[in-house]
Image (spheres, rainbow, N blue to C red):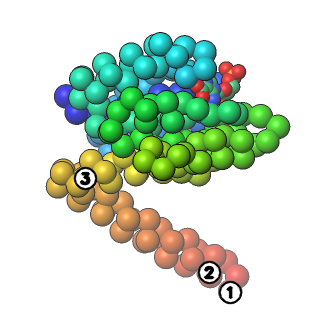
Amino acid sequence: MKFVSIVIGSKSDYEVMKSCSDTFEAFGVNYEMIISSAHRSPERTKEYVLDAEKKGAQVFIAAAGMAAHLAGVLTSKTIKPIIGVPMSASALSGIDALLSTVQMPAGMPVATVAIGKAGAINSAFLAMQILALNNEELSVKLKEDRISKAKKVEMDSLEIETLIQ
Ligand SMILES: Nc1c(C(=O)O)ncn1[C@@H]1O[C@H](COP(=O)(O)O)[C@@H](O)[C@H]1O
């Protein structure tokens, strides 16, 4: 079965990353989410990537805060696309995780999205856009979603235009 793998560095990342799994639920995309840490459980992390790939993982999403090495370690173990989500988990509000996720050496890419909830949601959309390259049904759903978002902007505008008249 094809699916997206979501790896979070700690249970403390779950609340924000639920926005990612909720997005997959809304689009009917298969996913699994596990907690694993490149720092605290390095062997589990490495073994998981290889197992998940064998089970059918197409894209990996790695969410971690602070010195976020998780996405980079996943990248070191697979050539499947890796999307990194920097979490805000310290006094540096996610800037630490952003820099440690995005600043990968050449040839070892991590597609890095925004810090926090917007990034969590965008990681799901980016993963789905990758899957949609070979999935017409998902591609149609994503295009319909863009149309409904554009309509919402118009409706919101009409609402406030009415209010200020
Ligand atoms: N950055 C990493 C890694 C890693 O990169 O392997 N493992 C856990 N963490 C992060 O540490 C933060 C604090 O974790 P705790 O709340 O468990 O202390 C979390 O945001 C987690 O993703």
Q: Regarding ligand 1, which quadrant of the image does it lie in?
A: top right
State whether residue 100 is above or below residue 8. Answer: below
Q: Residue at x 60, y 20 (%)?
A: 39
Q: Nearer the viewer, residue 20 or 34?
A: 34
Crowdedness of circle 2 by 10 Å Cα count: few (<14), some, many (20+)?
A: few
Q: Please determine whether, in this image, residue 109 is positioned above or below residue 67.
A: below
How many neighbours does mark 3 have within 10 angstroms: few (below 14), some (14-19), or many (20 or more)?
some
Q: Position of residue 121 (x, y in %)?
A: 49, 47
116 relative position to 128: left or right:
right
Q: Amino acid at mark 3?
A: Ala
Q: CA distance from mark 1 to mark 3?
A: 43 Å
The reply to whether the residue tagged 2 has its Cβ within 8 angstroms of ligand 1 is no
Contact flag, marks 3 and 2 (Cβ < 8 Å) = no
Numbered marks: total: 3
**Which label lies toward us, 3 or 2?**
3
Q: Does residue 15 lie above or below 113 as drawn?
A: above
Residue beneath disc 1: 165
Among all residues in the image, which is located at the extreme right? 91
Rendered residue at 17%/55% (across/down): 136
Task: Find residue 88 and report its horizontal and vertical position in percent.
Answer: 70, 39
Is label 3's Cβ within 8 Å of ligand 1?
no
Q: Quadrant of the N terminus?
A: top left
Residue under numbered circle 2: 162
Residues at circles 1 and 2 in contact by the CB criterion of under 8 Å: yes
Q: Secondary structure at mark 2?
A: helix
Disc 2 marks which amino acid?
Answer: Thr
Residue at label 3? 132
Q: Amino acid at mark 1?
A: Gln
Residue 109: image x %, image y %? Answer: 45, 47
Q: Secondary structure at mark 1?
A: loop
